[in-house]
Each structure stands twice: as structure tokens, then as C-alpha cells.
Amino acid sequence: MSFLDSDTILYIIIIVVFLAFFLWNGNRTKKNRELKKNRNFRNRYNERKRNKFCRY
């Protein structure tokens, strides 16, 4: 049996696909988390700004 028979190649492809999916999903999750953080910050900032002008 050689090192690169069909079963070995299949297992390597499956491992690479799973690694690629988890890396892609991690990057997407990180971007979504940053967008949510920025959105929350803008909402808090705008709320404080509205309350500041409503008091006077």
C-alpha cells in the first residue's frame, strides 16, 4: 500500500474541508460580533444624545 491511496486522499480532503469551514465560520462570527458591538455603541450614543437635548 502506498501512502497516497484513495482512502487516505479522501480522509485528507474531509479534514481540509472541515478545517476550512471552521476557519471561515470563525471569521464570520468575529465580524458579526464587531458589527453588533458597534451597533450597540451607536444606539447608546444616540440615546444619550437625545436625552441630553430633551432635558433643556
Image (cartoon, rainbow, N blue to C red):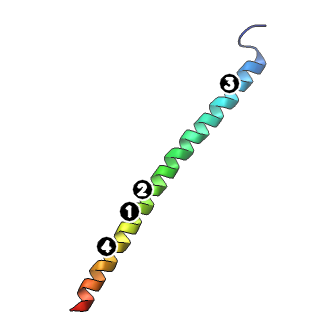
Q: CA distance from mark 1 to mark 4?
A: 10 Å
For label 4, the crowd category at 10 Å Cα-Cα, with few meaning under 14, some 14 to 19 and many 20 or more, is: few
Q: Secondary structure at mark 3?
A: helix
In space, the residues marked 3 and 2 are separated at their CA atoms by: 33 Å
Q: Quadrant of residue 41?
A: bottom left
Give the CA distance from mark 1 to mark 3.
Answer: 39 Å
Question: Which numbered tag is attached to residue 38?
Answer: 1
**Earlier along the polypeptide chain: callout 1 or callout 3?**
3
User: Badge 2, how many Cα within 10 Å: few under 14, some, many 20+?
Assistant: few
Q: Amino acid at mark 1?
A: Asn
The amino acid beneath tag 2 is: Glu
Residue at image x 70%, y 31%? Answer: 14
Q: Earlier in the sequence, mark 4 or mark 2?
A: 2
Mark 3, Cα crowd under 10 Å, few <14 / some 14-19 / many 20+, is few
Circles 2 and 1, Cβ within 8 Å, touching? The answer is: yes
Q: From the viewer's perspective, is residue 19 above or below residue 12?
A: below
Left or right of 6 on screen, residue 45: left
Q: Amino acid type of disc 3?
A: Ile
Q: Please report the residue visible at 77 percent of the width from the left and 20 percent of the height from the top.
A: 7
Q: State the image coordinates of residue 27 (x, y, percent, origin top left).
A: 49, 45
Residue plotted at (35% across, 73% down): 44
Q: Could you say which disc has been placed on residue 34 in the image?
A: 2
Residue at mark 2 to residue at mark 1: CA–CA distance: 6 Å
Measured along the vertical axis of the image, is residue 37 above or below residue 29?
A: below
Dot 2 falls on a residue whose secondary structure is: helix
Which quadrant would the C terminus be assigned to in this image?
A: bottom left
- The residue beneath circle 4 is 45
Q: Secondary structure at mark 1?
A: helix
- Residue position for label 3: 12
Name which of mark 1 and mark 4 comes first in the sequence. Answer: 1
Instruction: Verify CB contact (< 8 Å) between mark 1 and mark 4.
Output: no
